[in-house]
Amino acid sequence: MVNININDILETINMIKEENLDIRTITMGISLYDCASDDVGVVCDRIYDKITRTAENLVSVGGDIEKELGIPIINKRVSVTPISLVGGKYSPEDYVRIAKTLDRAAHTLGINFIGGYGALVQKGFTVNAANLIESIPYALSETELVCSSVNVASTKAGINMDAVAKMGSVIKKTAYLTRDKESIGCAKLVVFANVPEDNPFMAGAFHGVGEAESVVSVGVSGPGVVNSAIRRAGQCDFSTLAEIIKKTAFKITRMGQLVASEASKRLGVPFGIVDLSLAPTPAVGDSVAHILEAMGLEKCGGHGTTAALALLNDAVKKGGVMASSHVGGLSGAFIPVSEDAGMIDAVECGALSLEKLEAMTAVCSVGLDMIAIPGDTSEEVICGIIADEISIGVANTKTTAVRVIPAYGKGVGDKVEFGGLLGYAPIMKLSDYSCADFIARGGRIPAPIHSLKN
């Protein structure tokens, strides 16, 4: 017989009602290897049929669990095998047709996003990968729910600078083609190093090559809960603070484990992972920046911010890993600018710069995320931003990523409005100095010496 503590129940209810605790996403991963064909019409039919058949009950099951357990489940999503790996000889135009098929399947299911329109090119390009990357601006401008990611580096392979250079061009073109919607196409495009193959969060989610036929994974969120716990603790020392965060992360992750197990059972697919990342939103009380400020910083971005974030990220991982047997994805603290009210405030008042954000990414879960930059930023500067961030991931054997939006027709002092979970972002100032000659060298930056572990 299970002993139920009434205080635990009341605490969980308070977390949900007052502190914005939620399940950020249930994401079903689906393998598309058996959809391969040289005939793009056949492959599109197979992809649509398999996705809509496999994930047919995803939204309804998520809704039922939400009602029965009283736990908000914000998004229901699907990730698929990286499309460049689905066998067949496809032109860029063929890939756009496949993207539209993914979009149609997502609309049929009623999900929020579908991820996996991407390629893994950390060591070089296949013909299919090159054609898919060429198609990305058109695919993202002609679909609504499709998300794309490209892995350009890993600690084992080094950095494919030819891929970095290509992605600078892709980002610029995507911004232009979606200029009538605040260049929103770039908000659905991520450039990775050391990409995780089981990440349930968009825009970087895809169904990895080592995964089962289909799996269900959960991404939890709870910045407001952690913030409240820290504020209640008052002026304690760092060891005590870390313990408080660990215990809070444990409670949050246990809720995610419960939802993931229940979803797995009802959908009849294996349970993949719980990603215990603190994923913020623009809502008041749901900010990672405000957690750092609760630790004693006057403003996120001031001196001490990186140390505070390192403590937070480590404690979240330690607490979460004890709460679930299968922790994966990114798991830690996200620092997207447009999706975090505290980060937006810090940028607007001048406390938080791109350079400080870059330093913070060395100790958090992802990278330079949802950052709006001037629309006239050159391809080479975008490539330089990507290269800097990706090198942090490669050197530190961690996942890093870049999701920047060169907002067409806008400059420093303006802002872009996306709405919903994507929020809004002030345009951030960049360095005026060129890196064009550096990017033009091409080739690969070799893997670091500590990659030789065998």
Image (spheres, helix red, strand yellow):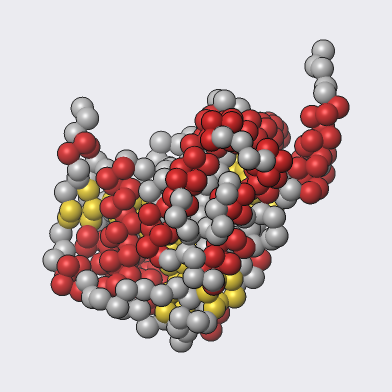
Q: Is residue 137 above or below residue 101?
A: below
Measured from the top left, where is residue 334 in percent x and y? 52, 51
Near-viewer residue (130 or 181): 181
Question: Residue 214 falls in which quadrant of the image?
Answer: top right
Question: Residue at position x 35%, y 79% from top?
Answer: 377
* Residue found farthest to the top: 1
Question: Residue 406 falls in which quadrant of the image?
Answer: bottom left
Image quadrant where one finds the N terminus = top right
* Residue found farthest to the right: 6
Q: Is residue 333 above or below residue 428?
A: above
Q: How many marks?
A: 0
Question: Residue 103 falls in which quadrant of the image?
Answer: bottom right
Image side of residue 73 versus residue 289, left or right = right
Question: Residue at position x 43%, y 66% from top?
Answer: 353
Near-viewer residue (394 or 195): 394
Say if residue 149 shows up in the picture. no
Measured from the top left, where is residue 42 in percent x and y? 46, 58
* Residue found farthest to the bottom: 409
Question: Residue at position x 65%, y 46% from top?
Answer: 227
Image quadrant where one finds the C terminus = top left
Q: Is residue 247 above or below residue 35?
A: above
Near-viewer residue (158 or 135): 158
Measured from the top left, where is residue 250 in percent x and y? 63, 31
Question: Residue at position x 19%, y 45% from top?
Answer: 447
Say if residue 240 shows up in the picture. yes
